[in-house]
């Protein structure tokens, strides 16, 4: 899946001459922590974070009056406090690559740029939503099991076939290995069924090692 499929397309952005009080208002009202800064031609100029606003806010120990502080902040523009070297990605960047880039660069969002123009933004919350979606976590009518398998060809297929033959319909599958458990693999499977409890009991009877099991809510 590509970034363009999960990014926010209706981006809240500001121009380089936007004053700090307006930046603060937008972040507060829109409940966001990053504001891309664009030039008059729509190209990306930089990005302002909530931390940047905290950095320029008057210190509690400041001798400035409230009026003086407000006046000075009103004169301070986005282009003066923004980060100009912005970590970005393209609409066709794989979601996994975007996540690795954010992790590696330690940033909370990635402006999405196409031919220099800002076309979207992807945030850490977008990645969390993506993870919840692909794992089927929003499918509350599904059962979830974690099964310990031998890390051999065909073992996962056997498990999924068994669930299907017992009346289950697979919603999602994730597998992972563990460095301290050579030759083993954990399969996390979500499935729907009229009687998921019976399927789980039958898997136990077939001597599958279930590490966890959760039945549908409700």
Image (cartoon, rainbow, N blue to C red):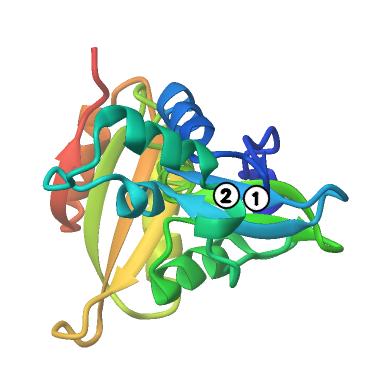
197 w.r.t. 115: above or below:
above
User: Toward which corner of the image does residue 31 lie, by quadrant?
Assistant: top left
183 w.r.t. 121: above or below:
below
> Mark 2 Cα within 10 Å, few/some/many (few <14, many 20+)?
many
Residue 203, given in percent of the width and then of the height, sits at 22, 47
Residue extending farthest top: 218
Q: Residue at x 40, y 61 (%)?
A: 158
Who is closer to the viewer here, 204 or 132?
132
Q: Residue at x 82, y 49 (%)?
A: 42
**Helix, strand, or loop for circle 2?**
helix
Judge depth for marks 2 and 1 and give the one in front. 2
The label number, if any, that marks residue 37 in the structure image? 1
Q: Is residue 10 visible?
A: yes
Residue wearing tag 2: 78
60 to the left or right of 186: left
User: Toward which corner of the image does residue 1 lie, by quadrant?
Assistant: bottom right
Residue 136, given in percent of the width and then of the height, sits at 42, 38
């Amino acid at each position: 899946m590509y970034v363009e499929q999960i990014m926010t397309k209706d981006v809240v952005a500001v121009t380089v001459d936007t004053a700090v009080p307006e930046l603060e208002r937008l972040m507060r009202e829109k409940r966001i922590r990053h504001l891309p800064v664009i030039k008059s031609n729509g190209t990306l100029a930089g990005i302002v974070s909530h931390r940047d606003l905290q950095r320029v806010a008057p210190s509690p120990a400041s001798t400035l009056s409230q009026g003086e502080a407000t006046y000075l902040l009103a004169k301070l523009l986005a282009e003066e406090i923004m980060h100009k070297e912005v970590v970005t990605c393209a609409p066709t960047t794989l979601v996994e690559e975007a996540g690795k880039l954010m992790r590696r660069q330690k940033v909370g969002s990635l402006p999405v740029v196409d031919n220099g123009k800002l076309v979207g933004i992807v945030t850490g919350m977008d990645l969390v939503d993506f993870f919840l979606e692909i794992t089927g976590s929003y499918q509350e009518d599904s059962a979830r099991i974690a099964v310990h398998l031998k890390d051999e060809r065909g073992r996962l297929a056997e498990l999924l076939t068994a669930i299907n033959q017992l009346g289950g319909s697979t919603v999602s599958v994730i597998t992972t290995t563990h460095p301290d458990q050579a030759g083993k693999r954990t399969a996390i499977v979500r499935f729907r069924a009229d009687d998921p409890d019976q399927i789980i009991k039958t898997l136990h009877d077939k001597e599958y090692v279930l590490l966890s099991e959760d039945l549908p809510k409700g």
